[in-house]
Amino acid sequence: MKQVLDFEKPVVELRGKIEELKRLTEDSEMDLSQEIETLEQRLENLEEDVYDRLTPWNRVQLARHPERPTTLDYIQAMFTDFIELHGDRLYGDDEAIVAGIAKYKGMPVTIVGHQRGKDTKENLRRNFGMPHPEGYRKALRMMKQADKFNRPIVCFIDTKGAYPGKAAEERGQSEAIARNLMEMAGLEVPVVCIVIGEGGSGGALALGVGDHIHMLENSTYSVISPEGAAALLWKDSNLAQHAAETMKITSYDLKKLGIIDTVITEIRGGAHRDIEAQAANIDKVLQKSLESLKKLGKDELLEARWKKYKQIGDYTDLPL
Amino acid sequence: MLKDIFNKKRKYASIPSQEGKQEVPEGVMQKCPGCHKIYYRKELERNLNVCPHCGYHHQQNAFERIKSLVEEDSFEEWDKYMVSTNPLGFPEYEAKLEKDRQKSGLNEAVVTGKGMIGNNETAIAVMDARFRMGSMGSVVGEKIANAIEQARKEKLPFIIFTASGGARMQEGVLSLMQMTKTSVAIQRLHADGGLMISVMTHPTTGGVSASFASLGDFNFAEPGALIGFAGRRIIEQTIREKLPDDFQTAEFLLKHGQLDGVIHRHDLKNKLATILNIHKPGGENS
Ligand SMILES: [Zn+2]
């Protein structure tokens, strides 16, 4: 049973009613096919109403859905021969980030991604997908290795943010993130970043300097969580829903702002409803990305990356 | 020209600037947060805004910083008229910008350009915490990236003085992406063998600390400067534990291996000039 979000309750209730009627016709001689057909039509309309007109806040809820597919789910669905690799060789192994090598349609690749847990126990082990510096340094180690062996890199972004802790600061959370931004800029292999859940601030960005950036339709990418923004701007975290709109954090917003390349269509009701089908949607976009990027020479690749990021932003000149 | 940024009202003609009155914005006297002594602002300014009694480093604004480091009349400002738009249509953002332009005499939270430090021509970026708390929006990111790129092209060393609360909330994810923009520019500078020195001043936090501030060949800080990624309160709430008083200070970072050094403002110009000299092509003869 999938966890039901508040806004989809009417859909789930109606679907339940239809199921009940169907069971009733099976057990008795009653013919309810007319009623069922009417209700199914109504369900179709209702689903359209709810799922095809999601508010930014609804998308935040979907991006945070406990059953939302994670990096490891997509690795399993889209890649073969995956070997996970551990540790930053400096301090430890941060399980909030998974990294390793694999094949993608026969092509060697390196994969790096944030990793949330699916239950409390796993979440404790993975620190809810919020990395420490050693996580970012592990990621960078794998990316440098990919650079050496000329393997494209695929990054899955899914974090509330870098962990705000004492030890994280002592070990240089800022430096670790900053270094990843800079070093990723110089990688001479194609880098494709896919936001699959929450793209929370600098902690997301540290795996996010790619030649192409794609976002699942119901994922978010933001400088601060809606709750954080509401608290900071209006001193009231209850205004999070409002902040989700004001801060422009949905995939469509980021496409409009010229930051991402593609909005990857999501299964109606959210990626968690059909992981295989969702992976297939991502697969199409990733394949196209890698095919086009592999055609570029190293200099072209780096120059295009610079131009891509240089053009982000909006400003004007003061009239004299 | 240095004179331009200090004196000529005309350059900021479209904003009713208060530059002329900047000498006494908060009164004649100043109380020191370090030793609680009260003294004349003039006395403080003569001492590079360092408390003559306890050594507390008061903030320097961008103009004061440049004046204290760069040879007079050698400063050429870049992107001086670049200003923010309101890309997200954020309520009241324009009014806030306008207010800070008037208050600070700046067009944005960073001043960039080139000038002579000793006998070294140097590209410089100086952030100013009086403007939107030094937060990084599109203009800050663009100006810094342009300055780095210009340094790369002209083969100049690049020095940045950071002072920032982090991201510019009103520009949302565009603000976040300036971390990337500036970092990509720095990668290009480093790849070409360019020299970059970062001097973190109070405060340097969030997205600025997690991008260009940490990416120098040399990362220094001023005494007592607050430097960190996450805010103290958020960390205390998260780990449910009280943090030590010196947490996220320059001295704390030095102790944990995150800085090359903590430099007193009175020594800054000399140390920077020495580093520039050591890296100067043919420096062995000068
Ligand atoms: Zn004092």
Image: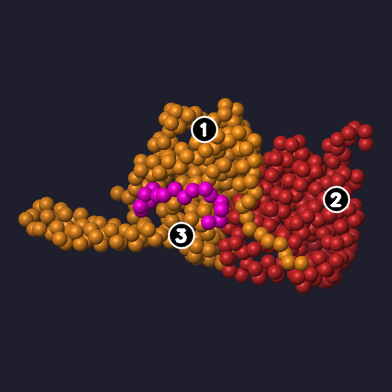
Residue depth check, mark 3 versus mark 2: number of the one nearer the observer: 2
Label 2 sits on residue: B115
Cβ atoms at labels 1 and 3 below 8 Å apart: no
Mark 3 Cβ and ligand 1 under 8 Å apart: no
Pick whichever, A202 or A294, lies toward us.
A294
How busy is the neighbourhood of tag 2: few (under 14 within 10 Å), some, or many (20 plus)? many
Q: Residue at x 83, y 37 (%)?
A: B279
The dominant secondary structure in magenta is loop
Query: Chain B drawn in what color?
Result: red
Kindly report the distance in space between the C-alpha atoms of the residues bearing marks 3 and 2. 47 Å
Q: Which residues are magenta?
A: A256-271
Q: Where does residue B158 sit, x and y in percent of width and height?
A: 78, 45
Identify which amino acid the numbered label 1 is placed on. Answer: Thr
Q: Is residue B236 above or below residue A183?
A: below
Label 1 sits on residue: A110
**Dot 2: chain letter:** B
Q: Classify mark 3: helix, strand or loop.
A: helix
Query: Chain A drawn in what color?
Result: orange
Pick whichever, A204 or B81, lies toward us.
B81
**Dot 3: chain letter:** A
Tags 3 and 2 on a common chain = no
In the rendered image, the residue lying farthest to the right is: B286
Q: Where does residue A13 sit, x and y in percent of width and height?
A: 27, 59
Identify which amino acid the numbered label 2 is placed on. Answer: Gly
How busy is the neighbourhood of tag 1: few (under 14 within 10 Å), some, or many (20 plus)? many
Label 3 sits on residue: A56
Kindly report the distance in space between the C-alpha atoms of the residues bearing marks 2 and 1. 45 Å
